[in-house]
Amino acid sequence: MKNPGLAAVLSFLICGLGQIYNGQVGKGIALFVAAGISGLLCAVVIGFILLPVVWLYGIYDAYRTAEKVNKGAGENVAG
């Protein structure tokens, strides 16, 4: 069982960490890299828009994925 709140908090602290917690290592690393690139793009203004979008998506995705993992785990136990 995965804790959706913990997954969201981990992604809030470090973009992609919630995905890694959920077992989606590739997606977590991709989000971490995307956030890093977005941070660098802040020097040319577009990063100020892109970084919050990537960061908020990471938080939302980590939460939703943990819920899906839990639903799948519940179905496996019941079935």
Image (tube, rainbow, N blue to C red):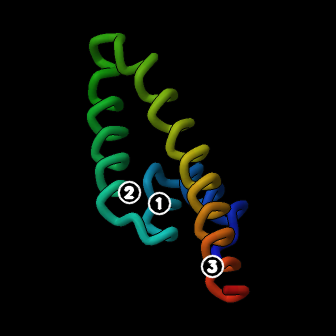
Amino acid type, label 3: Ala
- Dots 2, 3 in contact, CB < 8 A: no
Horizontal side, residue 48 vs residue 78: left or right: left
The local crowd at label 3, few if under 14, some if 14 to 19, many if 20 or more residues have their Cα within 10 Å, is some
Residue wearing tag 2: 28
Query: Is 65 above or below relative to 20?
Result: above
Amino acid type, label 2: Gly
Helix, strand or loop at label 2? It is helix
The local crowd at label 2, few if under 14, some if 14 to 19, many if 20 or more residues have their Cα within 10 Å, is many
Q: Nearer the viewer, residue 36 or 62?
A: 62
Q: What's the distance in space between the residues labelled 3 and 1, CA to CA? A: 17 Å
Residue wearing tag 3: 73
Give the tally of numbered discs: 3
Helix, strand or loop at label 1? It is helix
Report the residue at 43% width, 66% height from top: 20
**Residue farthest to the front?**
79
Residue 3: quarter of image:
bottom right
Place of residue 66 in the rendered image (x, y in percent of width and height, measured from the top left): 61, 63
Tell me the mark number nearer the camera, choosing from 2 and 3.
3
Question: What is the quadrant of the C terminus in the image?
Answer: bottom right
Residue wearing tag 1: 19
Query: Is 33 above or below relative to 5?
Result: above
- Dots 1, 2 in contact, CB < 8 A: yes
Amino acid type, label 1: Gln
Place of residue 25 in the rendered image (x, y in percent of width and height, measured from the top left): 34, 66
Query: Is 29 above or below relative to 38?
Result: below
Earlier in the chain: of badge 1 and badge 2, it is 1
Q: Nearer the viewer, residue 78 or 28?
A: 78
Earlier in the chain: of badge 3 and badge 1, it is 1
Place of residue 9 in the rendered image (x, y in percent of width and height, measured from the top left): 65, 57
Earlier in the chain: of badge 2 and badge 3, it is 2
